[in-house]
Image (cartoon, rainbow, N blue to C red):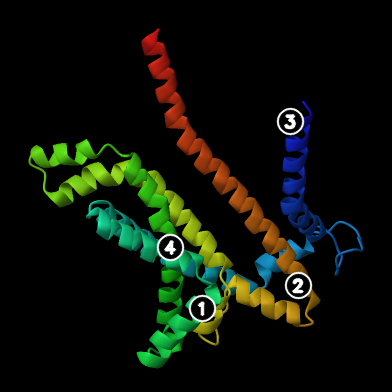
Amino acid sequence: MMKKILSHTWLVLVALFMYVPVLILAFYSFTKSTAIGAVRGFSLQNYVTLFTMEELRDMIVGTLALAVGAAVIASVLGTLGAVGAFYSRPSTRAALETANRIPVVNADVVTAFSICIMLIIVFGIDKDTFVPLVIGHSVLCTPFVYLAVMPKLKQMDNGLYEAALDLGATPFQALRKVVIPQIIPGIVSGFMLSITLSLDDYFISTYTKPATFDTISTYVVNATRGSQTEIKTALWALSTVIFVIVILAVMIMNAASDGPGKKQEVSAHDGRK
């Protein structure tokens, strides 16, 4: 009994440690306060500023476009890489998995410097073309798509692919009609994770973005160094909106993934009866 109480207490403390700061920020986003610590009454002005100030709107739209574009590229590359590694020899697969882990554990600042040196200095790609920025975010996200898709491939019945080939399907047809539908949950998870990583990235964006472009992360850092109180408090509202969207997305994904499984489980249970 005591062990159970301690484990529950620990879970509650961990949850409070993670979510209380976010909830405090969300609370102050609905006030007239200009600094955390002094409540000055209820107000929606921060949200009005967030959605009416052209500078903030352009920054948000640009960041979302970058995140979605990088996530699409990363999803394609990560999925193809995972499928190719899965159907390769064990030694080749082990080498590819090891290579894929390096960007995951590597510090973002190292990746940012490397991409900046290779693309901008060595290859001479113009920084104002957005090419280094998109490539940098795609490099950041692709390994995580690989990690999300590979477990789904391992869970898949490999006999389905071989049966499709035996029935006359080409390798591409078998991939498109048999393998891809089986690993869709992994691809979606990798895509959503890629969007989150892109929105959160600071170092790669800083070293590869055009001078006139800002992502949410770079804009927030620059805004906190300035003296524009209206923008700072509007960013509290932006943080709250992002947090709510993430919660809703996770809930929808969980409901979508649990629904079919629960129906199949109920059907199987009824069949046994």
Examine the image and state in which quarter residue 22 appears.
bottom right
Q: Amino acid under label 2? A: Lys
Label whose residue precedes the other's in the sequence (4 or 3): 3
| Real-space CA distance between mark 3 and mark 1, rounded to the nearest whole angstrom | 43 Å
Helix, strand or loop at label 1? It is helix
User: Is there a contact, CB below 8 Å, between mark 4 and mark 3?
Assistant: no
Q: Decide if residue 160 is in sight here.
A: yes
Q: Amino acid under label 1? A: Val
Which residue, given by chain and number where applicable, does mark 3 sit on?
Answer: 4
For the point 56% across and 81% down, which residue is it? 206
Report x, y in % for residue 75. Answer: 37, 59
Which residue, given by chain and number where applicable, does mark 1 sit on?
Answer: 110
Q: Decide if residue 54 is in sight here.
A: no
Residue 101 numbered mark, or none: 4
Query: Toward the viewer: 172 or 62?
Result: 172
| Real-space CA distance between mark 4 and mark 2, rounded to the nearest whole angstrom | 37 Å
